[in-house]
């Protein structure tokens, strides 16, 4: 498929998503119980692809406050199936404080869907200390059934979600940050400001600290999930670099990533993409294309390891050059930082490696709100 067709298709998907959101809002505000349940089922389908979807707070609110018991039961089931970030706390509160036995029972079953120790500690506590005998026996039954299931399969779930899965180290992936604003600084001077409008659309602005030059770089990123483990994206980017201290020529570059393909989930994925830019200066114009492949794997709740291989092609430059990037992402709930190294590959690289055996150090940090 031509890149222009991919771009148009992703724009259409974004428009469809907006219409779906309007339809869901109408269903959620309906006075009819059946229509609100229908909305929960639609949201569940959307959020199964992305547990950080924009509707998590809505589902949690319905599970706690909806006047219909049937709607609350369906919302509780949705929390367990999707495994929302704050779902364990919500389900635990329903079990502890609700006076409606049916809700407590459904919350216990939903809690058993979480494959993390925190959830099973709560279930174990219910099985030992709950005064309601039916609920206590159900907790014991879940421990026996689910415990056997968990022992037969490797489970690696992390309670902390990476706040910035949108790139491997420096190269963008087809994943998005959660909706809202973020700011990332690369080596303190280069800044990327991001407004994630939806699960498929992000507006981006690149700039630097205005020391000797101005940089303005708007961009737009569009993504789409083909399946749970296959995602595609497109990034359009332009940047204008204007020196102001010396009589230097300004530079305009146009390009982006006509192809982004990410395979896997956010805790472990392979990323394949092509960066392509056309540089426009007063004396001479030229292009650069950078096919690259990278990947990331989560190694603990707060750390993931990433690596990228770059094979750039420059106009009128025949010697082989390349670059290997590798490093660690250290993350919190809303902040993140990367400690990484770049190993350039070219004829004289041995001289650099004598003084920087790990590679050239690179640092970045960012936050979301």
Image: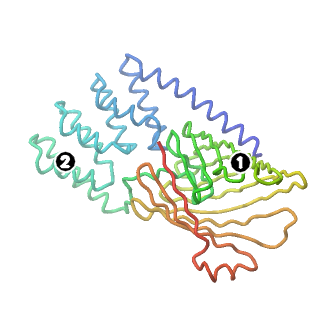
Assign a secondary structure to mark 2: helix
Residue 280 as seen in the image, left or right of residue 268: right
Query: Where does label 2 land, which residue?
Result: 139
Question: Height in image: 98 above or below 83?
Answer: above
Assign a secondary structure to mark 1: strand
Q: Earlier in the sequence, mark 1 or mark 2?
A: 2
Q: How many marks?
A: 2
Task: Find residue 214 and name its label.
Answer: 1
- Give whichever of 236, 128 is nearer the camera: 236
Residue 173 as seen in the image, left or right of residue 124: right
Question: Residue visible at 57% across and 76% down?
Answer: 358
Can you name the residue that lies furthest to the right here?
283
Report which quarter residue 350 is drawn in: bottom right
Question: Height in image: 63 above or below 116?
Answer: above
- Give whichever of 359, 30 is nearer the camera: 359
Report which quarter residue 59 is drawn in: top left
Q: Nearer the viewer, mark 1 or mark 2?
A: 1
x and y percentages locating residue 114 in the rendered image:
33, 50
């Amino acid at each position: 498929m031509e890149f222009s067709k991919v771009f148009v298709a992703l724009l259409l998907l974004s428009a469809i998503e907006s219409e779906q959101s309007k339809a869901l809002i109408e269903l959620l505000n309906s006075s009819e119980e059946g229509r609100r349940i229908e909305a929960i089922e639609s949201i569940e389908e959307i959020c199964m692809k992305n547990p950080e979807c924009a509707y998590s707070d809505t589902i949690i609110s319905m599970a706690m406050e909806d006047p219909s018991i049937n709607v609350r039961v369906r919302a509780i089931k949705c929390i367990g199936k999707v495994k929302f970030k704050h779902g364990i706390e919500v389900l635990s509160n329903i079990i502890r404080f609700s006076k409606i036995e049916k809700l407590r029972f459904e919350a216990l079953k939903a809690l058993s869907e979480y494959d993390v120790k925190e959830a099973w500690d709560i279930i174990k506590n219910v099985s030992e200390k709950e005064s309601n005998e039916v609920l206590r026996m159900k907790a014991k039954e879940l421990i026996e059934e689910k415990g056997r299931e968990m022992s037969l399969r490797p489970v690696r779930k992390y309670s902390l979600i990476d706040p910035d899965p949108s790139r491997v180290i420096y190269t963008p992936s087809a994943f998005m940050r959660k909706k809202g604003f973020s700011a990332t600084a690369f080596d303190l001077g280069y800044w990327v400001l991001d407004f994630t409008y939806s699960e498929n659309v992000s507006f981006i602005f690149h700039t630097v600290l205005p020391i000797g030059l101005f940089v303005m770089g708007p961009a737009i990123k569009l993504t789409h999930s083909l399946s749970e483990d296959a995602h595609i994206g497109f990034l359009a980017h332009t940047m204008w670099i204007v020196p102001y201290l010396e009589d230097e020529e300004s530079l305009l570059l146009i390009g982006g990533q006509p192809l982004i393909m990410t395979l896997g989930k956010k805790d472990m994925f392979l990323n394949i993409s092509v960066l392509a830019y056309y540089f426009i200066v007063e004396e001479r114009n030229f292009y650069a294309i950078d096919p690259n492949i990278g990947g990331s794997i989560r190694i603990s709740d707060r750390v993931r390891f990433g690596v990228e291989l770059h094979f750039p092609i420059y106009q009128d430059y025949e010697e082989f050059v390349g670059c290997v990037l590798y490093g660690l992402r250290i993350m919190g709930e809303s902040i993140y930082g990367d400690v990484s190294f770049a190993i350039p590959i070219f004829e004289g690289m041995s001289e650099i490696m004598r003084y920087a055996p790990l590679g050239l150090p690179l640092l970045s940090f960012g936050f979301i709100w």
